[in-house]
Image (cartoon, grey):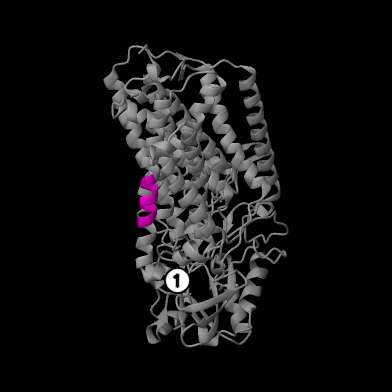
Amino acid sequence: MERTIYREIKPTPHVWIAGTVLGSLIALAALCVFYIEHHGHIVTGMTNQIFWGIPHVFAIFLIVAASGALNVASIASVFGQAAYKPLARLSSVLAIALLAGGLAVLVLDLGRPDMLLVAMTKYNFSSIFAWNIYLYTGFFAVVIGYLYVQMARGVAPTTVKAAGTVAFVWRLVLTTGTGSIFGWLVARPGYDAAIMAPLFIAMSFSFGLAVFILVSLSLCRITGRDFGDFLLRRLGRLLGIFVALVLYLTAVQHLTNLYAAEHAGIEKFILMSGGIYTVLFWIGQVVLGGIVPLALTLGPKGLQSRRSVVLASSLVIIGAFSQIYVIVIGGQAFPIDIFPGYQANSTFFDGQIANYKPSAVELGLGGGGIALTLVITGFVAVVLRILPTTLSDANVASAK
Amino acid sequence: MTTIALAPGVTLIALGGAVEGKADPNKRWGLLIDVNKCGADCTACVTACSQENGWKDTGHPQTDAQWIRKVDLKDMATGREVSLPVMCQHCSTPPCVDVCPTGASFKRADGIVLVDKHACIGCRYCMMACPYKARSFVHEPLEDQKTDVPRGKGTVESCTLCVHRIDVGGSPACVEACNTNGHGAMLFGDLNDPNSDISQTLREYPSAALRGDLHLNPGVRYQNLS
């Protein structure tokens, strides 16, 4: 095994093309934001019944994946798995980029993004949202510090481990905070569950690793660097374990709700009669995002290959969007039961299942968040030495 | 309101404080709604609120603000039908205030729950947290606003209990309209004053809070609902 050498990626024509496409998507997202801010949210699909829409699905996906993307670095520094060490820098950069992309979408969907300074200066500490502002900004600082000690010369391994441990604990707290945005809501039957925090942590492990696998493979591919089969399949097996964890916690979430008669309505809605939400739950989340990737990564040896890991990672991301859509939009679509035992009807749609159709401008904004994440990652890879010259199995410690 | 002249023609105006100054911590304003007296087809309270506060039907029912709404209920076990107005319940421990990241959602000393439009960033988390679906997000640019009732595109709003009328000794527009219309289904008063009409009626007759299981101690109570 040779020493790992990190090199900036060269701005080849492929890199420029990718940068141009992604830059155009960011410019398109900026136009969408101006359009929404000028006309108001009336031009989106959001309403007074469903007021968190597809931008929030994108934002939550990116924010949750951010903490998960850091896992590869944590496994290397905190848990001492040498095979993951060459990927640790990229893992840290991707984590920062994902969080930046997610926060950009979240902030630009605000009714008053121009008032962001207020959110930075006025805090209500009984709000988990306010705590999250600290957790998110702190995450940037902690991970940038962690990246610095990984890259600086002459830093003792114990210092890297200490920085990695702080980042690992911070990311667990951060995802707890994100899950608690829903878990602490007593008003709505789809939320109000302590399991939201561990569920979101499991989701972050899975979604973050899936994004990491696809981004690191793509970067190696467009720069002509090797990515060893064994390393990829090892990452795939880890992804399979995380997918299983998400499926397990999802099962516990719904079984717990099914046991309580008061939650029978929301469970019937999500699991059986919710139309798009039921389809997304069973087909998107459970089958495509759960069972199939599980089989591709942990199933029979015959199924396991480079392609199957790539396919599993892509399916996990489809499942991730399905799951977050069901949680965020499905949880709002089901009516609040203000009058138990009564059938309610009003001009404000009491007692009715709410409709939501994402608009093109919302999708444009969400897509801009993903593009921003990829541009940041690619730009950092061009200017900093975060990607090894080779990730071939011969060059990666304990890859076998 | 504090004003400081920074330079000729440039004045720094500090808003806030004045409203808080009028809130009496010894009072807790509340409403008691007698469901039996509420007319099934009557929407006088809704019309009065709309006219008083300037929110209106723009032809977009999914996105229009509704500070108060009439809800028609049918008891699924007995078939009994009732109609009643629902608005911000002005909780003693309001979830909207707990979750607001900037403190824009706040409760005055006299129990009225409001949104500070200068601090609301339009995140809509309070709408997620409200168990009564009492809040609306302003989806469109606004015109012809009422001078007493500040509103803003991109911010969240809800019933203010007509705080601008209360602060000058008046009562909410919905209550006035209900009385004028002859129903007298809405009683407004100080819940902290044992001699007020609302306190005496609450003491004498059974009443209920909506979503009583949440223990939010709302300032709006309902009589003859169950």
Q: Could you tell me residue A286's position as x and y percent?
A: 46, 52
The answer to whether residue A193 of the structure is visible from this angle is no
**Residue A263 visible to the viewer:** yes
Indicate the position of residue B91 as horizontal and vertical percent values. Answer: 44, 66
Q: In front: A138, or A57?
A: A57
Q: Residues within 10 Å of mark 1 (few under 14, many from 20)?
A: many
Name the residue nearer the viewer: A208 or A155. Answer: A208
Q: Quadrant of the C terminus of chain A?
A: top left
Chain for disc number 1: B
Reading the image, the residue beneath label 1 is: B219
In the image, residue A145 above or below residue B71: above
Is A387 placed left or right of A164 in the picture?
A: right
In the rendered view of the protein, which quadrant contains the N terminus of chain A? Answer: top left
To which quarter of the image does residue A131 belong? top left
Query: Where does residue A18 sit, x and y in percent of width and height?
Result: 62, 26
Residue at the limit of the structure toward the left, as seen here: A158
Identify the residue shown where x is 61% and y is 62%: A355
Q: List x then y, in percent, for residue B116.
A: 54, 54
Describe residue B193's horizontal placement relative to residue A352 as left or right. Answer: left
Farthest front residue in view: A302
Tell me which secondary structure the magenta stretch mostly adopts: helix
Vertical relation: A157 (above or below) A204: above
Q: Which of the pair B154/A264 is nearer the observer?
A: A264
In magenta stretch: residue B222 = no
Give the magenta-colored segment's residue range: A244-252
- Which amino acid is tagged 1? Gly
Q: Residue at x 59, y 60 (%)?
A: A48
| Element type where label 1 sits in the image | loop
